Amino acid sequence: MDGSAKTLHSPTKAMTGSAMTLHSPTKAMTGSEKNPLSATKLLAGSVMIRHSLADAILSATAMSRPSPPVFFQPIAPSPKPSPDEDIQPTPPPPDPSTLETIQHAAGDGKERLITRPNWNEYFMAMAKVASTRSTCSSRPVGCVIVRDNRILVTGYNGAPPGEPHCTDRSSNGTLYCARRDMGILDRDKLDHCRSLHAEANALELADRLKLGDLLKGATIYSTLSPCIRCIKNLAAHGISRVYFEILYNSVDIARDREWEELARRKFEIFEQVSISKDSLDKLLLTILRPTSRRLLSSW
């Protein structure tokens, strides 16, 4: 076998120079590096340097990387409330001296630890809530039209859609009224008032919803007795009962009496109603605190 063939079986003998350093690194070292202990220290040092460089690169990358959005930040779970944590104490039984009033309000003579408004109080309260949407600076009015103790429509007084509201501006730091700002007297206010009356808005909505048949024999609850125009409009739609919180009471007393007499002729019932103290207290408490918190513990 010639020399080239021998190199296939003895590759280490055929290698020269740097190739031999792969198999015998310590033999290729010179000077102090021929010491195996020194070579080990150098290798360990180079490893530590590489690790330090890697740590430095990672740290620099982390510092230059933008912080994640807020919605990716972990949110600590809120403590889970116990089932009975929001329980309110059961209200004490009513004073015996008030039971007669409570029974009268309920209309059935039953004793109750938890009272509720009668129908007139209930719907008048709804009308009062509707009045909070009024945009009249002078007399906010709200109303509800009811059939068989079910609300058909609600209404409040304010400017027609797209027109400016009186409550949206002031007059030299005071409440603004377009009619008063023009110097129109009270006797001519119906021709110049910017607002549509609450009753007119409720009837207009009922017409749009095609509730005409349901209005016949229906009842209206309003925070103010109707004006002459609303009396005629309500009667024309078949409203038979009118309950109000306060009378119109303008500067023209004779005119007010004329309107009242007409209303009593046109409607089966034309009556002033109010909300009792017990019902008013309950309504206020219901509004001022979360309404549906438990009164009794869960099982």
Image (cartoon, rainbow, N blue to C red):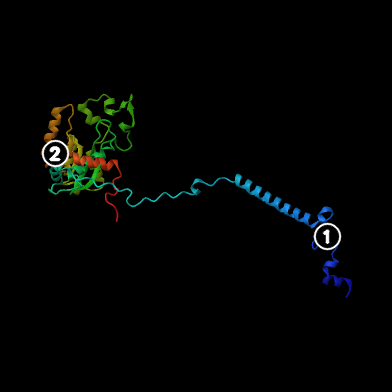
What type is the residue that disc 2 sits on?
Glu
Q: Which element is circle 1 on? A: helix
Q: In this rendering, is residue 106 above or below 255?
A: below
Circle 1 packing at 10 Å, graded few (<14), some (14-19), many (20+), is few
First in sequence, mark 2 or 1: give its number. Answer: 1
Q: Residue furthest right?
A: 2
Looking at the picture, how far across and down is residue 93, in whole percent?
19, 45
Q: Is residue 103 left or right of residue 88?
A: left
| 36 and 168: which is toward the camera | 36
Residue plotted at (52% across, 46% down): 69
Horizontally, residue 194 falls left or right of residue 277, namely right
Q: Where is residue 251 in the image (x, y as percent from the top left)?
A: 18, 26
Asked if residue 5 lies left or right of residue 228, the reply is right
Say left or right for 90 vs 254.
right
Q: Which of 230 and 100 is in front in this view?
A: 100
Residue denoted by label 1 = 27
Residue 252 is labelled as none
**Separation of residues labelled 2 and 1 (CA atoms):** 120 Å
* Residue at screen point 88% across, 71% down: 3
Quarter of image, res 277: top left
Residue 225 at least partly seen:
no
Q: What SS does tag 2 mark?
A: strand
> Mark 2 = which residue?
271
Which percent across, then down, holds residue 193? 25, 31
CB under 8 Å between discs 2 and 1: no
Q: Where is residue 67 in the image (x, y as percent from the top left)?
A: 55, 45
